Image (tube, rainbow, N blue to C red):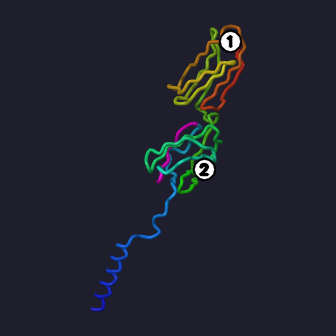
Amino acid sequence: MGLKKAITAIAAMLLVSLALPAQGLNLPQAPRATPAIEGSQAKADSVIRVAGWDFKKVEQVLIDDLPTTFQASSNTLIAIRIPLGTNPGDVTITLVSNSGNTKSSFQIEIVSLETEKDTKVTIGSFLGYVAVYTKNLSGEKLSIQVGNKFREVSVLDNNFTANLTKVGGNRLVEVKVFVAGQLVESAMVLVR
């Protein structure tokens, strides 16, 4: 009967310990991100999605110490916009909450538009217009400065676009082209 009593005593202690409320386990947890990101490269002003937990507690997101916009679509998924001033290379994402700050280094590389070989911006002119042609920049924000005129195309809807700005004939103007807020091309153009 000694073994039966020992097993019964152990089982009773186990049941009692499970029935008692756990003390010290209710510590607030800071939100934490895991390296579950779509793809390994992103551009400035693009949105990445990050998995993790406690994202509803997030009050601020910093990417390499730059504040940025974010949207926690659930407690385990957050969408983060890469700020325009982010330097190319690997980034550190800091999640700020009232439970504390957590930093996560990711294997995601921020690439500048100039390093992408398949994109192209060409500046030209014809019949009193400055023409800015783009290739493979669908979904990007385009801004064009022609002399002192400034024009924005919120999102390019095609991989090949022609963007015309009326200037008038026989004028020499400076043209600057920005994609996602970065200067990618500039030229002095004689408009005929």
Which mark identifies residue 92? 2
Q: Residue 180 location in percent, x, y?
A: 60, 32
Quick one: label 2 or label 1, which is nearer the N terminus?
A: 2
Query: Which residue type carries mark 1?
Result: Val
Q: Is residue 16 magenta?
A: no
Q: Specify start and end residues of the magenta stretch as a single range.
A: 45-54
Total marks shown come to 2
Residue found 61% across the figure and 27% down from its top: 120
The correct choice, above or below, for 85 with respect to 54 in the image is above
121, above or below 11, in the image: above
Q: Quadrant of the C terminus?
A: top right
| Callout 2 touching callout 1 (CB < 8 Å) | no
* Residue at point 42%, 70% (across, down): 22
Q: Nearer the viewer's eye, disc 2 or disc 1? A: 2
Amino acid at circle 2: Thr
How crowded pointer 1 is (Cα within 10 Å; few <14, some 14-19, many 20+) is rated as many
The quadrant holding residue 122 is: top right
Residue 88 falls in which quadrant of the image? Answer: top right
Question: Where's the N terminus, which quadrant?
Answer: bottom left
Q: Is residue 150 above or below residue 19?
A: above
Of 141 and 135, the residue lying toward us: 141
Towards the viewer: 99 or 103: 99
Task: State the residue at coordinates (33%, 76%).
Answer: 15
Task: Determine whether the residue tagged by mark 2 lies in a helix, strand or loop.
Answer: strand
Crowd class of label 2 (few under 14; some 14 to 19; many from 20; radius 10 Å): some
> Does the stretch in magenta take in 51?
yes
According to the picture, the residue beneath numbered tag 1 turns out to be 191
Q: For this rendering, which residue is in front, 146 or 137?
A: 146
Which residue is the extreme one toward the bottom? 2
Residue 155 lies, in percent from the top left, at 53, 27
